[in-house]
Each structure stands twice: as C-alpha cells, then as structure tokens.
Image: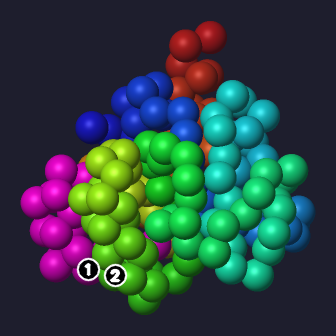
Amino acid sequence: MNPQEVLKRHRTVAVVGASKDPTKWAHIVPKYLKEHGYKIIPVNPTATEILGEKAYPNILEIPHEIEVVNVFRPSEEVPKIAQEVIKRKRERGDVKVLWLQLGIRAPPEVKQQLEQEGITLIEDTCMMETHKQMTSQTQ
C-alpha cells in the first residue's frame, strides 16, 4: 500500500511524539490532519491533552481503534515503538500501518518483523505533505 492509499483508506491516526508546542512539526502535522477530517489520538507520556484530544502514554493504552501509527520520534526509538505496534496488532488486530515521518527510518530487522505481521511500513515521509500532494492532484 502506498502513502496515498493509506491516507485514502485509513482515518484514525495515533501520533507518537505529538507535541503541545505549536511551532513543532509534531504539532503542526497532526493539527493539519485533524483539520482535514482525520481522527487524531496523541501519544505523549508527559501530556494529558493535545489539540483538544486526550493524550495517552503509549499506543497500548489507547482504548479506541487505531489504523495508522504516525511517529515523530528519533529512528533509535523505532524498534521499541514497532514492538508496541506488533503487540497491539496481535492483541487488538487494529493497527494496519506504521508511518515514520521525514528523516525517520526503521532498521532491516524491524522492516522484516512488520512485514511478517502484515503491517505496512512507510518511512521518511511526511503525512501532511503527502496529503497536500494528493489533494492538489484531485482538484
């Protein structure tokens, strides 16, 4: 599944590393997505609310369905986040996509694990820019 297909098919996005700081991309991108009809679920262990939405300390504690996990954390944290995604998929069956923002990549062993679990991986790609490109092509 390519990035455009992900954005067309899936509307519920958990944002790992979501920020309260309106100058950071980890705030700007989820705000943009929310303004364009996506359900945003912030994941930040130091926040209780971001963008008017309840924030959760990790994806395993989110009670609602998650389709996409969008990551704004350093590449070094991707293996740990991927393990949470895999655990959640096994327990709840809901996560379809792990999306790593610009500059964030997964190591080969993580890519292999995600593929084995049937989880689509998109890396080094901005969700907001992909959405902007997609919507400008349809207008």
Left or right, residue 47 beside residue 26? right
Identify the secondary structure beneath mark 1: loop
Residue under circle 1? 107
In the picture, measured across the screen, residue 125 lies left or right of residue 44, that is left
Q: Dot 2 lies on which element?
A: helix
Residue most extreme to the top: 139
Decide: few, some or many residues near mark 2? Use Cα within 10 Å; few <14, some 14-19, many ≥20.
Answer: some
Q: Quadrant of the N terminus?
A: top left
70 or 103: nearer the eye? 70
Q: Residue at x 45, y 85 (%)?
A: 77
One can see residue 71 in this view:
no
Indicate how the structure is coloured in the image.
rainbow
Magenta stretch contains residue 76 = no
Question: Over which residues does the magenta segment extend?
Answer: 104-119
Q: Position of residue 17 (x, y in %)?
A: 64, 72
Q: Is residue 123 above or below residue 95?
A: below
Question: Residue 129's mark?
Answer: none
Q: Which residue is mark 2?
A: 79
The answer to which image quadrant residue 56 occupies is: bottom right
Q: Of 134 and 112, which appears nearest the observer?
A: 112
Residue drawn at x 66%, y 46% is 40
Amino acid identity at mark 1: Pro
Whether residue 8 is visible here, answered yes or no, is yes
> Which one is earlier in the sequence, the residue at label 1 or at label 2?
2
Counting from the top left corner in percent of width and height, residue 13 is at 56, 47
Task: Please identify the quarter of the rendering in which residue 89 is found.
Answer: bottom left
Mark 1 and mark 2 residues within 8 Å of each other at the beta carbon: yes
In space, the residues marked 1 and 2 are separated at their CA atoms by 8 Å
Query: At which x and y percent is residue 80?
Result: 38, 83
